[in-house]
Image (cartoon, rainbow, N blue to C red):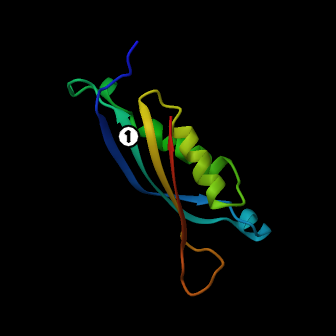
Amino acid sequence: MGTDQRPLTRILLERMHFQGHHGVLAAERRIGGPFSVDHALHVRAPRRYRDRLSDTLDYRLVFARVRSCMERRRFRTLEALADAIALALLGFPLVRRVTVRVTKLAPPLGGGASSAVEIRRRA
């Protein structure tokens, strides 16, 4: 059996905003704050796109998986959160690689700073 040599398609879903309860400080986990998630999904492309949803990913299902990680779970670090999102997205059969960027829009750093983590994983 040979390896599937079909090319990959890169799908970008960006600026998904969520209210999350993630952080090292107890107050961050209790009160929550705004987060943004961007990701690139490298999916196995069909030999030819026929304009059917079955040829690709349903973006609504992708959003639902990210939302579940962001709103139903709690993490102390952005690294663990980004990793959980990446692993959830690799659960889609067509996804071969994923890059996830999680941005904490209002961390307790002062000065209007944001913090972000980008993680890459492959199936």
Vertical side of 78 occupied by 27: above or below = below
Label 1 element class: strand
Would residue 69 be found to the left or right of residue 61 on screen? right
**Disc 1 designates what residue?**
42
Q: Residue at x 60, y 49 (%)?
A: 83
Residue at the far right: name it: 26
Residue at the far top: name it: 1
Residue at the far bottom: name it: 111
Where the N terminus falls, by quadrant?
top left
Q: Residue at x 46, y 44 (%)?
A: 98
Choose top left, top right, bottom left or bottom right for residue 15: bottom left
Q: Residue at x 46, y 40 (%)?
A: 62
List x then y, in percent, for residue 63: 47, 44
List x then y, in percent, for residue 53: 31, 28
Vertical side of 84 occupied by 8: above or below = above
Q: Residues within 10 Å of mark 1 (few under 14, many from 20)?
A: many
